Amino acid sequence: MFKAPRFFKNLQNSFVERFFKNFTQDIGIDLGTANTLVYVRGRGIVINEPSVVAVNQRTGQILAIGREAKKMAGKTPRHIVATRPLVDGVVSDFEVTEQMLRYFINKVTKENFVFLRRPRVLIGIPSGVTEVEKRAVIEATLNAGARQVFLIDEPMAAAIGARLPVIDATGNMIVDIGGGTTEIAVISLGGVVISRSLRVAGDEMNEDIIRYSRDEFNILIGEKTAEEVKIAIGSAYPQRERLTSFLRGRDLVSGLPKEVAVTDEHIREALSRSVRIIVNNIKTIVEETPPELLADIMHRGIILAGGGSLIRGLDKLVANQTGIPVRLMEDPLTAVVRGTGVVLDDMESLKEVLLEQETNKSLG
């Protein structure tokens, strides 16, 4: 029986791949603890919603996902729980994560009438996750409807999103402060030279404000209130103008509603523990960086990304503590997902930045 030479088989596979490319769309996902962002190749960022799922614990039914689920947080009866399926950047509830990913992937594919082929998906994950945690992300995404799954370190994706020359023999340092994790990395020649993943980030800062409110003012506030105050007046460095806001919650003594006026100095004190941990780890990475790469970083500066980097004065504090220029990248909240988009647009030349995974198999 005649067998086609391998050359013709490869040519045939290449033709089929190019043909079907017109009937599918690659998707990049920043699967964050606080928010999930989805990038579609050729369209840009199409989804930016909270990583929250509302579940009826009596029936196991999922009632809402994303923005609608977050509206329910703290306002549901006991049998309905608005939960985050990711904790500290990793999957804590496999089934709920799978449902959330399926919801976002279906939302994208239905909008684009992609019915012939399932999409390839590129997901940004924290640099410190284990092989088991990587496998959980891959399996959940495949089960959610992906044809093939690729993984990329979040700091690498953020650096690419910041348009840093990650493939060159040049040192680049990025600090990505998200909701569940802070990723600190030095990148060169398409790889992470040295990195550190901290479980201290935006969510921990909210907890700092909750603890401070309880200890200093005897008032119990919710996570949503803490986050609003953090965004309104949170800072890591003294401000020129005094900023004020209000803490509204329950008086721990009387049990009645209570409102307390606070300033940026109060919130800066509340955030000082988390900020100090992040800055100290940045200094540690700087100290461990090879001299030649450190020379490049001193010239190019440290890049801040992620929602937590928007804390006022954080760039000045890091610059003062390290002696290295620091700049906040443009639109830091979307850094990782924009990086996945750049990789999807030029997968061939940027394939070396992807993480190799034995479990990463196409399902056809």
Image (cartoon, rainbow, N blue to C red):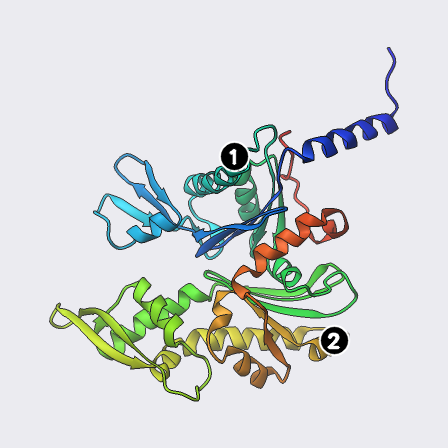
Q: In this view, does 187 lie above or below 143?
A: below
Residue at 83%, 30% in the rendered image: 11
Residue 256 makes an appearance in the image: yes
Q: Where is residue 3 in the image (x, y as percent from the top left)?
A: 86, 17
Amino acid type assigned to the residue bearing label 2 in the image: Asp
Along the polypeptide, which appears first: circle 1 or circle 2? Answer: 1
Name the residue that disc number 2 marks: 296
Real-space Cα separation, disc 1 to disc 2, in angstroms: 43 Å
Give SS at disc 2.
Answer: helix
| Quadrant of the rendering where the N terminus is positioned | top right
Q: Position of residue 342 (x, y in %)?
A: 66, 54
Name the residue that disc number 1 marks: 143
Residue 355 image label: none
* Quarter of the image where one finds residue 338: bottom right
Q: Where is residue 47 in the image (x, y as percent from the top left)?
A: 49, 49
Looking at this view, name the residue that lies furthest to the bottom.
Answer: 240
Going by the image, does 133 lie left or right of 267? Answer: right
Residue at 64%, 64% in the rendered image: 162
Going by the image, does 209 lie left or right of 126? Answer: left
Residue at 68%, 35% in the rendered image: 21
* Quarter of the image where one finds residue 364: top right
Observer-nearest residue: 287 or 14? 14
Residue at 25%, 37% in the rendered image: 58
Going by the image, does 155 lie left or right of 94? Answer: right
Q: Do the residues labelled 1 and 2 touch (CB within 8 Å)?
A: no
Give SS at disc 1.
Answer: helix
Q: In this view, does 228 lie above or below 121?
A: below
Amino acid type assigned to the residue bearing label 1 in the image: Asn
Q: How crowded is mark 1: few (under 14 residues within 10 Å), some or many (20 or more)?
A: some
Q: Where is residue 146 in the image (x, y as percent from the top left)?
A: 57, 36
